[in-house]
Image (cartoon, rainbow, N blue to C red):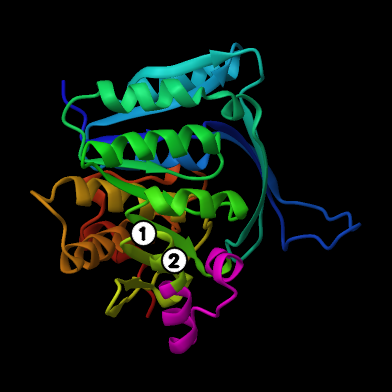
Amino acid sequence: MSRAIAVVASLNVDHIVHAPRIPEPGETLMGFSTSRELGGKGGNQAVAAARLGAEVAVIGCVGQDEDGDEYLEALLAEGADVTHVRRSASPTGRAAITVDAEGVNSIVVVSGANADIPAAAAAAAINELPGLRVVAGQLEAAPEATERAFAAARSRGVLTVLNTAPADDVARKLLPVSDVVVANEIEFRQLTGQDPFDGHGLRRGGAELFAAGCRWVIVTLGAAGCAVLDASSSTHVPAVAVRAVDTTAAGDAFVGALAARLAEIPGEPTTAAVVAACGFAAKVAAVVVTRHGAHPSLPTSAEVGDAGISDFLQG
């Protein structure tokens, strides 16, 4: 079976604490509740795309532990191809997440097996998978594996989508093999030193990323929506106004939805097509923030239409 999307994926188990606010350094704070769920930026992106109807292959690594067994079973249940998910002696990745009363989160990730994805195997997987249209990745998984996978995709004429999270110097190495770069406001500042809410800063920062080799830059701006830039234009895509309860996985859902929509485009994508895909991704993210958790919050195609979010609209 052909796979329209491949995700070089971090696969984590999330341990989530709900608290009135994010604690200050050195502070002990009483929380409301705890939960344990499957997550990881790459895993969330893959599941998001699969629930929206995309054919998805996952390239990743989990531990030889019960968490790894659970994650593989969950991906299979979503219809994802896990042929290229390996097992490692390292434990399955973990994330500690604090969510405040406004739905804002703070996350610490321990990579574990995610750091063990073999770069050569990732590239080989891209070359072996038939029917690929988009390869997505982020920086929680082994960066060398993502870089090799993106280079292999570029050589096949397959679109690459890089989510620069968490942003660091490694992201710069991936820009030359990334067609679409998706950064949130913090990551954009870290990569470029520019303020994405300032029009001049947005264009200056975008120009820096274009000079490094990418073709489109998408800056997600939370409740302000997102900006889509190419080398000569900038387009604002508004967010859907909702009552947020948990922003966990919202950015991942945006990337997964973006990849799913881009994979449907016949031939070379245009900036107009990228903007339209971002509008769809914004709807998906709007559903996600009205729900708790990572995988449990990711919607199906049927839930993304206006009826799927109308109960949560502000006003």
Q: Are marks 1 and 2 in contact (CB under 8 Å)?
A: yes
Whether residue 43 is visible, yes or no, is: no
Q: Residue furthest right?
A: 26
The boundaries of the magenta stretch are 187-207
Task: Write the residue at 66% across / 60% down.
Answer: 100
Whether residue 293 is visible, yes or no, is: yes
How far across and how far down the image is residue 165, in percent?
Answer: 54, 52
How far across and how far down the image is residue 151, in percent?
Answer: 36, 39
Q: Which residue is mark 1?
A: 214
Q: Quadrant of residue 289?
A: bottom left
Q: Residue furthest left?
A: 266
Q: Quadrant of residue 126?
A: top left
Q: Quadrant of the N terminus?
A: top left
Q: Which residue is mark 2?
A: 209
Q: Quadrant of residue 80?
A: top left
Considering only vertical position in the picture, is 193 above or below 114? Answer: below
Q: Which amino acid, mark 1?
A: Cys
Q: Work out whether residue 102 or residue 217 is closer to the camera in this orientation and state it.
A: 217
How many residues crowd mark 1 within 10 Å: few (<14), some (14–19), many (20+)? Answer: many
Is residue 204 part of the magenta span, yes or no? Answer: yes
Considering only vertical position in the picture, is 114 above or below 250? Answer: above
| SS at circle 1 | loop
Q: Name the dominant secondary structure of the magenta segment.
A: helix
Horizontal side of 231 relative to 96 (left or right) equals left
Q: Work out whether residue 62 or residue 267 is closer to the camera in this orientation and state it.
A: 267
Residue at mark 1 to residue at mark 2: CA–CA distance: 6 Å
